[in-house]
Every structure is written in structure tokens, then in C-alpha cells.
Image (spheres, grey):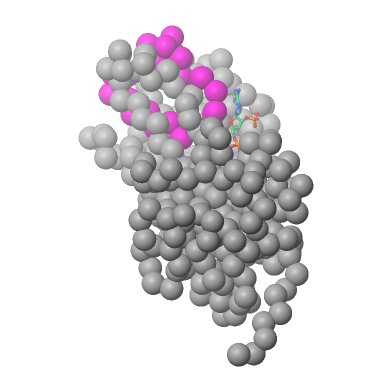
Amino acid sequence: MGAARLRGWKFCLLGGDRRQDYLGCRLARSGAEVWIVRRRPPRFPGLRHSRAKEPALDGARVIVCPMAPFGPDGRVCSEDPEDLLALTESDLDLLARPSVLFAGSFPERLAAAAEKAGCRPVALNDMDEMAILNSVPTAEGALLMALERTTVTLHSSKALVLGYGRTGQTMARTLLALRARVTVIARRPAARARARADGCEALPLEELAGALTDARFVFNTIPALVLTADALERARPDVIIIDLASAPGGTDFEAARRLGLTAVLAPGLPGRVAPETAGGHLAEVVTRIALQSLAPVEVRPS
Ligand code: NAP
């Protein structure tokens, strides 16, 4: 990233997890003025800090909200439960015009209000590039969570991967690299064909319950209830289920608890296990889109 390509640009990073610190660092290294808004101070020097959002939003050209969805009334997700941040429609009036607003996804109303205020909303979760880059720390984090809970190696174990989209593919390939025996469960024949071409076994969703009977590990990426109580009844008692799909996940957790199975919902893994890598990916994407969307800032020599 060029040393001064963001000189004169003001960035406001709202809430989020440790990714924001690394993102901020990378942006500041490119010359940007970076404000971190939350209760706890930034982890690195060179970043401005404010508990109140107004000074940070005032004149900002770029705002970066977390990848996790907004809560009710524009509530911004933060790793610190005491951060009670929200981005409201009236906050948008404080921004420079034009500006760019990044988030994982947007409530429709906020996206429409942003457009109206001359602020381009960019939903990072809709971008294949972002999802594919994020799938790597997600898969590694899922392995970590699984291995912490088991007494066997992934090598030679039977692992199910539910869904064969961006995360499912990386998950399956990572497991194959460890010589696990990988079976992919996917609803589309083309996805199953791709999984077979990649070296996995592949089954349709209707065969999930049968496949569960001898699986030691299950990694779910399908954002719909697929691990139902009926299916879970067929699982081995020592199965480890890591549910990667966004909340509420694809597992009947209540049934899993009743059956004594280990099932964990694992949200936000990139920020938890590899914030430096994930923050670096964010910095690349945010910088490129910001530079494409907004005119350069004229910086007068001091
Ligand atoms: P994706 O590329 O859209 O893949 C989703 C997969 O689920 C596809 O195989 C899709 O099948 C399948 N699917 C969706 N709805 C289904 C349904 N009702 N029945 C059966 N199959 C269904 O999404 P992704 O980027 O891999 O992300 C997957 C999930 O992981 C999302 O919820 C995402 O938010 C979450 N995620 C979590 C983390 C984390 O840290 N835990 C990190 C990244 C992503 P088709 O191709 O047939 O539609």
C-alpha cells in the first residue's frame, strides 16, 4: 500500500473487533487520519480515539462499521458489550460529501438514507472477494475450535462439510490438506460435482442424517436449520459440531444439548483468530473501493 496515498483522508472506524485496530494501522500507514470510536483505546499508536461518535464522523470521507450485522435502531456490533454505539440516519449529515460507508450488510433503511445523503453504502458480505478472503481465517478458526474439543486427529477422521459455497469450499480443502475423510453435503448437483472433483465425497441434503451416523466432525456453513433434532438423533455421541453459519446457525442447539452432543456456534472467527490477517484484507478492499469511489484529496504543502 503506497505510503501517502490516503493523505488528507479521514476515516472513522465504528465498534467491531480486533480487526479494526489492524485495519486502522494499515490505513494510517497509508497516510490517513484514522479515528477509532469505542470505549477502549486503540491497541496501536498513531490512531485517534473517541468514545463519542460525533468528532470522528465529522467530515469523515470513509466510515467502516463491523462485518457483523447492525442490531435494532442502527446498533453497531462491538466486541466490548459496554460499547453502546449506533449509526443513525441523522449521523450521516456529519459526513463529508461524497463519502463511502462500509459494513458487512445494511438494513435497507440505512442504505437508502446513506444514498440520499451522498454516501455510498458498500456491503462487504456481498462481495465474493471479501467472503473468499475471510473463508481462510474462518476455516483455520473452525479447525482450532474442533481440535480443542476432541481427543482424535482430523487426519483419517470422517468430517462432514455442510454447504459448498465460499466458506464450505475452503473448509473442505483445508480438511483435505490434513488428510481428513471429507464428505460434502450440498443441495445443488453442480456443487456436489465440484466437491467430488476436489476430492471429497458428496451427498444431497436428504442424506445428511444417514451421513451423520459415523461422522466425527461436522462443519456447517448453511444458514438454515439443517441439523434438526431428528438428524442429530442419528449422530455419534462424540461428534463435534462447529456451526459457522451466521446466527442463529443451522443447528438445533437445544436438541444437541438434550442429546449431550458437542455443538458450538462460532461467529466472527476471522476477527477472533486472525485479526491481523483479516484486518489486512479489509484494508486492501476498503482502500481500493474508497480510491475508486472518491476523488483524490488535494493536500497543500505545509
Ligand atoms: P455462500 O457462499 O452463499 O454459501 C452458502 C452455502 O449454503 C451454499 O452451498 C448454499 O447452497 C447453501 N445454502 C444456503 N441456504 C441453503 C438452504 N436453505 N438449504 C440448503 N443449502 C443452503 O456463503 P458463505 O460465504 O460460504 O457463508 C456461509 C455462512 O457462513 C453465512 O451465514 C456467513 O455469514 C457465515 N460466515 C461465518 C463466518 C464465521 O466466522 N463464523 C465467516 C464467514 C462467513 P447454494 O449454492 O445452493 O445456494
In this view, 176 is above or below 287: above
In percent of the image, x 43 and y 73: which residue is there?
46
- Residue 32 in the magenta stretch? The answer is no
In the rendered image, residue 190, in percent from the top left (x then y), is placed at 68, 31
Viewer-nearest residue: 276 or 167:
276
Q: Which residues are magenta?
A: 222-245
Q: Which residue appears at 57% of the width and 80% of the height?
A: 3
287 is higher (above) or lower (below) than 18: below
203 or 46: which is nearer to us? 46
**Horizontal side of residue 223 vs 298, given as left or right:** left
Q: Position of residue 67 (x, y in %)?
A: 53, 46
Residue 235 within the segment the image draws in magenta? yes
- Ligand 1 rendered quadrant: top right
Residue 294: quarter of image: bottom right
Asked if residue 100 shows in the view, the reply is yes
Which quarter of the figure is the N terminus placed in?
Answer: bottom right
Instruction: Report x, y in % for residue 270.
Output: 45, 49
Residue in the foreground of this view, choosing between 17 and 211:
17
Q: Quadrant of the C terminus?
A: bottom right
Residue 175 located left or right of residue 259: right
Nearer-the-camera pick, 246 or 73: 73
- Residue 27 vs residue 261: left or right? right
Task: State the image coordinates of residue 297 (x, y, percent, origin top left).
Answer: 70, 75
Residue visible at 60% across and 43% down? Answer: 88
> Is residue 302 placed above or below 206 in the rendered structure?
below
